[in-house]
RNA sequence: CGGGGAGUGGCGCAGUCUGGUAGCGCACCCGGCUGGGGGCCGGGCGGUCGCAGGUUCAAAUCCUGUCUCCCCGACCA
């Protein structure tokens, strides 16, 4: 029984002045969320209903693949985090208890769940396991933003799988693919499963579930049969327009021209006819010269993955000492290993001459310098995959699945005995899902100029009954009865029984965005009808009063 | 962390430059009218102007410090 006259749904006519993202503006205006501090949000009753609906869908799908729900605390002793090596993470909230013991607020639960499994699992007979919980995560984000899109505290479903070997992990991973695909479909979002960076954590595979929308912080690269995070995407570059080859490199004077654009303009060439040199220093102190086409950009994540180690850009003095004047360096004659991007086709290019105010033209990879070939560039609009042009779209990451391997079982000593009595490390996977981001993504994807338009599976209410006319009038009696009938038919119904004008009620209903709005007013009632508006598209139809209670549930079940 | 911006009733804002004891719209409360797209009339409630010092006869306004929030970028195990 939810009557708006006594329900805490504080809608606002105006957007918060500091909000930019659509989901931020609308979720606040619709009375779903309220800010407490930077990156800290309360969920008001209607907003929490949305959150809980997403949670329930996730729970059902996790249970369907054999997940076992549990609950672990948010406050942890620091020790397990020291053992796993994650205590140093800057985002980790650290505090002390009254005795001065170091504590942390959990950003995820690998350490704790692994310890439980380590202490309870003895035998291969105890595996596999899928454990999960819904729990608050705490992260001291450098920059929270856009309402509930990026917060310092949020509820996450995190599941962890424990298997005896890589094949078992693969099976657990595939189960999560199935569950997550279904979750995304059921929530009514547009989504992509994309290849993702496995990071420096040494995992072997990762995918992200992305909901495309304007406020997204990630970029996904799409082509028929292909979807990847821009961080790791590979594609074929458009060919570079190159001048005719030269028999040998020639020096050209380029005084003061230290940018690709400047040199290209001065020589009347396209940027793609130049090579860009990017000196980096690896962990072991070795300098490498990364070379990409002039119109391309080095992708530091791909570069790090290709190198298998972390690195930093070389300092200007290091460049001067080992290569030449910054702005005029190039691979020809360089005294460090050259890592040439795969998108550099054979041909003669303009490069830095490693001398002040000079470039070389007609430099050919292989002939004029030796190199190792790697894919280290960011893909760009115009690139193709399998002959089709790629699209690059912003998206919100709402879920991720990740093969951890033995990253945690090793430091935390999670082992089992196999059939031959040998101790073996447990193979783990971890899988996150954010209900808050799912809700925000749905707002972003389907909002129109009137407000939110929820997918029916995650709307705060299935249907909103709006009654027009005075207290005690016939409209009220009909609406009261309809509200009763819809509730009994199993629809979660919000009843706008406030003493307010029609304009205000319609505006609020469309702002809050329940998939159906039923209007009981004098005009249609005179014909024995009520009006039903489908929120998405705002089309209105009329139904006979007498059968509306039976017809509306069917209508609702047809909605997206 | 770098750059930019903002803190004045619940929300959105003006007032600050040029100091004189706080105002507008919406919301809210009371009464009446109205009743199909945020309606009208009348009467009200509500603010130590983020905080702390200082200057001054007098500070929302000037000075110093500090806290908080937002946006862009960097970062995001």
Image (cartoon, coloured by chain):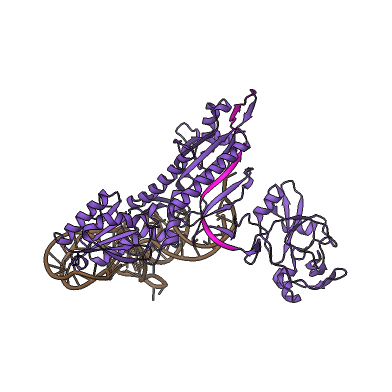
Q: Is residue A139 visible?
A: no
Residue A209 x, y percent position in the rendering: 53, 51
Query: In the rendering, at what x and y percent does residue A97 appear?
Result: 46, 34
Which residue is at the front of the view, A6 or A415? A415
Is the residue A109 above or below the residue A384 in the image?
above
Left or right, residue A83 beside residue A303: left
Q: For chain A, what colour was chosen?
A: purple
Q: Is A529 above or below relative to A88?
A: below
Residue B57 lies, with reference to residue A432, above or below; the image says below
Q: Magenta segment: does it hold A386?
A: no
User: Can see residue A491?
Assistant: yes
Examine the residues drawn in magenta and state their main secondary structure.
strand
Q: Is residue A229 above or below residue A62?
A: below
User: Of A433 and B2, which appears nearest the observer?
Assistant: A433
- Colour given to chain B in the rendered image: brown
Q: Is residue A483 left or right of residue A207?
A: left
Going by the picture, which residue comes out furthest to the top?
A421
Q: Which residues are magenta?
A: A391-420
């Amino acid at each position: 029984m939810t009557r708006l006259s006594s329900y805490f749904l504080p809608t606002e006519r105006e957007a918060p002045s500091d909000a930019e993202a659509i989901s931020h503006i609308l979720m606040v205006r619709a009375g779903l969320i309220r800010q407490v501090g930077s990156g800290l949000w309360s969920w008001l009753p209607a907003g929490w209903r949305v959150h809980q609906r997403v949670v329930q869908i996730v729970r059902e799908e996790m249970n369907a693949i054999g997940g076992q729900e549990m609950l672990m605390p948010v406050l942890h002793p620091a020790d397990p985090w020291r053992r796993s090596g994650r205590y140093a993470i800057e985002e980790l909230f650290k505090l002390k208890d009254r005795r001065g013991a170091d504590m942390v607020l959990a950003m995820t639960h690998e350490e704790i769940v692994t310890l439980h499994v380590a202490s309870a699992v003895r035998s291969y007979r105890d595996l596999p396991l899928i454990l999960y919980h819904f729990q608050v995560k705490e992260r001291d984000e450098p920059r929270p933003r856009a309402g509930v899109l990026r917060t310092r505290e949020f509820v996450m479903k995190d599941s962890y799988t424990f298997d005896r070997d890589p094949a078992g992990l693969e099976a657990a991973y595939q189960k999560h693919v199935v569950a997550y695909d279904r979750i995304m479909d059921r929530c009514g979002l547009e989504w992509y499963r994309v290849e993702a960076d496995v990071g420096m954590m040494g995992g072997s595979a990762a995918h992200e579930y992305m909901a495309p929308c304007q406020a997204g912080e990630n970029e996904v690269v799409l082509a028929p049969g292909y979807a990847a995070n821009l961080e790791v995407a590979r594609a074929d570059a458009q060919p570079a327009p190159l001048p005719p080859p030269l028999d040998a490199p020639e020096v050209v004077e380029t005084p003061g021209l230290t940018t690709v654009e400047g040199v290209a303009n001065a020589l009347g060439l396209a940027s793609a006819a130049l090579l860009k040199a990017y000196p980096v220093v690896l962990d072991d102190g070795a300098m490498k010269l990364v070379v990409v086409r002039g119109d391309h950009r080095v992708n530091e994540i791909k570069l790090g993955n290709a190198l298998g180690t972390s690195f930093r850009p070389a300092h200007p003095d290091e460049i001067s000492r080992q290569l030449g004047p910054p702005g005029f360096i190039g691979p020809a004659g360089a005294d460090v290993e050259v890592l040439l991007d795969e998108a550099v086709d054979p041909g003669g290019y303009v490069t830095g001459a490693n001398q002040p105010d000079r470039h070389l033209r007609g430099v050919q990879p292989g002939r004029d310098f030796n190199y190792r070939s790697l894919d280290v560039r960011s893909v760009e609009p115009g690139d193709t995959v399998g002959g089709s042009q790629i699209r690059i779209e912003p998206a919100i990451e709402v879920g991720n699945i990740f093969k951890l391997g033995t990253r945690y079982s090793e430091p935390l000593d999670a082992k089992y005995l196999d059939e031959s009595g040998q101790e073996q490390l447990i193979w783990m996977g971890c899988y996150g899902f954010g209900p808050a981001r799912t809700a925000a993504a749905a707002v972003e994807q389907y909002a129109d100029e009137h407000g939110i338009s929820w997918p029916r599976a995650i709307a705060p209410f299935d249907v909103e009954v709006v009654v027009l006319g005075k207290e005690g009038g016939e409209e009220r009696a009909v609406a009261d009865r309809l509200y009763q009938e819809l509730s009994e038919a199993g629809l979660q119904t919000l009843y706008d029984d406030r003493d307010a004008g029609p304009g205000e009620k319609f505006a609020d209903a469309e702002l809050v965005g329940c998939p159906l709005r039923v209007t009981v007013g004098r005009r249609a009632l005179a014909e024995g009808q009520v009006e039903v508006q489908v929120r998405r598209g705002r089309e209105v139809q009329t139904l006979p009063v007498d059968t509306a209670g039976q017809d509306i549930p069917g209508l609702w079940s047809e909605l997206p």
